Structures are given as C-alpha cells and as structure tokens.
Image: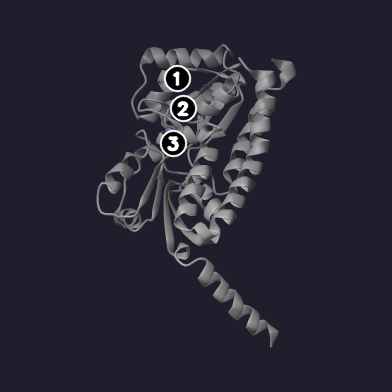
C-alpha cells in the first residue's frame, strides 16, 4: 500500500513545484553548450543540440527544416556568435516564440567580429554561460532558483580541476612555440601561455580557403626545423594540405594532438573533454625537455 501513495505524492510534488519548466525547450547550436544547459536545467528542460557530428565540419554546416522547426519552438536558444554559426542568425530572424530568450555566447564574453570564433576553448566562457543560464532559468521558474544555483556551484567545482591543470601546465611550458592546422585550440593555447605560430594559415583552412605557397612553406619549416613543439590537428576541418602537414609533423617527430570542434561522443562532459586534451599537451611537453 505504501508504494502507490509515494508515487502519487511525488507526481503531485513535481507538477506543483515545476508548473511551466517541464515544458521548457532549449536549443543549443553546438553540443558543448547543450551539455552545459542540460547540467544547469536538469530534468526541467528538453535540450536539443544541433551540431553534434564529430565527422562534420561545423564551418560548413547548413540548416534544414527540422533545425528551423526546433529553433521556432525554442524557449531558450544558445549559439556561439561572431560568425561561427551564422546560420543561427538566419533562423532567429524568422518566426519564434515572443518570450524566447537568445543567448549569444560571444556577446556574453565580449568577443568581437574578427576574433577567433572558437570561444568555448577559452576557460572563462563556460562558467559565464552557466551563470547566464541559471539567471534565465531562475527568472522563468523562481521556485526552482535554489536548485539551479546548486547546479551552478556543482559546475564551478567541476571546472576547478581544469583551471588547476591549465595553471600547472602554464607554469612549466609558457613561451613554448606550437602550431595548428586550424585555430580551434587558440584560446586554450593562450591560456597555457603557448606561442601559436602560423595563425593566418589556420584562418584560411578554417574558411576553406587556400593558404599561399609562402604560408605553406613557412608552416612546413616550423615542423621540419622542429621549431613548433606540438602540432594541434583539427580532425573536423581537414583537406589534402592539412593531411600532408600532419604527415610532415609525424616524420619530424613532432607530437600531433588531435583536437575537435564539437564535443566527441566518448567525452561525458565539457570538462572531461578539455582535461583529456590538456593531459595530451602535458604529456607532449614534459617540463624537463623544454
Ligand atoms: Zn574551427
């Protein structure tokens, strides 16, 4: 007799405490933002992430009818901004709920057009988004504000090992020269104090443009002369040039670290994903061999 009573009271509890939130729809342009939304909102929202495919180049994504419908139906939309996901600007320009809240993450962290668009690799970005989400969710459902606040504190605690790791690596490798096929890791490299070579080349690869012969020659030289101590290889934005560069790095004995635009399916959280990449950097740059 006790079990049915418990079920009944739980059902009542849920529907009376969370009247509107259960129907909340959050659409994130990218899965790493969707992951944070899921952590903050818990079971109070349905979260849909649009860019999730680790084999797709997000810079070349185009929308379809189902992404348009999801954005039109969203209560909260999260996107990166400054041109990374310009397709979302277009979707937001069409129909949507009048109460819809749009979070432009670049705006939130003060990134400007022309900046490196991969802002989620900057250590300050996800905590800023988590804080903003909790403010928005709490306004929508004040009765649950304390629970959202708890989720925020949990996330801030989870970020600590990442921030500690960044400081630990920075202390021993700051100033080391590295390079990359595409600028996805740029902000994290900055946080680590690494000196990133060949940025203009990387931007061209990002934009699917052909680097000049000079840029390519200079890039290859940073590998063959072992000036760059790491090659960050973006496996989501590749072409024959980047594949050749990867081969040159391997031949020269330069550690190649694979980095991705979206959160890979085998990484259970943003922090786990970042830590995995940071551990790879730490292993490639032991303090003694500098
Ligand atoms: Zn990119």
Which residue does the numbered mark 2 point to in the structure image? Answer: 183
**Image color mode:** one colour
* Res. 4 image quadrant: bottom right
Beta carbon at label 1 within 8 Å of ligand 1: no
Q: What is the residue that sits farthest to the bottom in this orientation?
A: 1
Q: CA distance from mark 1 to mark 3?
A: 25 Å
- Quadrant for the C terminus, please: top right
Is 241 drawn above or below residue 79 in the view shown? above
Beta carbon at label 2 within 8 Å of ligand 1: yes
- For this rendering, which residue is in front, 126 or 259? 126
Which residue does the numbered mark 3 point to in the structure image? Answer: 108
Q: What is the residue that sits farthest to the right in this orientation?
A: 288
Which residue does the numbered mark 1 point to in the structure image? Answer: 199
- In the rendered structure, the answer to whether residue 16 lies left or right of residue 271 reads left
Q: Are marks 1 and 2 in contact (CB under 8 Å)?
A: yes
Q: CA distance from mark 3 to mark 2?
A: 21 Å
Residue at (29% x, 48% y) in the render: 91
- For this rendering, which residue is in front, 80 or 145? 145
- Quadrant for the N terminus, please: bottom right
Q: Earlier in the sequence, mark 1 or mark 2?
A: 2
Within 10 angstroms of label 1, few (less than 14), some, or many (20 or more) residues? some
């Amino acid at each position: 007799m006790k079990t049915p009573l418990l079920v009944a009271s739980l059902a009542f509890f849920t529907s009376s405490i969370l009247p509107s939130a259960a129907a909340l729809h959050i659409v994130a342009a990218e899965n790493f933002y969707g992951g944070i939304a899921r952590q903050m909102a818990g079971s109070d929202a349905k979260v849909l992430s649009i860019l999730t495919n680790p084999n797709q180049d997000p810079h070349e994504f185009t929308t379809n009818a189902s992404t348009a419908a999801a954005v039109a139906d969203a209560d909260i939309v999260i996107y990166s901004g400054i041109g990374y996901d310009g397709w979302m600007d277009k979707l937001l320009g069409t129909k949507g709920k009048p109460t819809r809240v749009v979070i432009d993450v670049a705006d939130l962290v003060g990134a400007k057009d022309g900046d490196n668009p991969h802002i989620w690799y900057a250590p300050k970005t996800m905590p800023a988004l988590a804080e903003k989400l909790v403010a928005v969710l709490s306004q929508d459902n004040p009765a649950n504000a304390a629970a959202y606040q708890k989720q925020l504190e949990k996330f801030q605690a989870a970020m600590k090992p990442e921030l500690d790791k960044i400081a630990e690596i920075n202390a021993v490798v700051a100033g080391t020269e590295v390079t990359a096929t595409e600028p996805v890791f740029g902000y994290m490299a900055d946080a680590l104090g690494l000196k990133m070579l060949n940025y203009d080349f990387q931007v061209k690869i990002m934009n699917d443009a052909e680097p000049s012969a000079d840029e390519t020659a200079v890039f290859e030289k940073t590998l063959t002369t072992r000036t760059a101590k790491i090659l960050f290889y973006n496996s989501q934005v590749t072409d024959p040039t980047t594949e050749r560069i990867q081969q040159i790095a391997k031949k020269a004995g330069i550690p190649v670290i694979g980095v991705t635009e979206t959160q890979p399916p085998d990484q259970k959280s943003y922090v786990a994903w970042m830590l995995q990449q940071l551990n790879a950097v730490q292993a490639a740059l032991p303090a003694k061999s500098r």
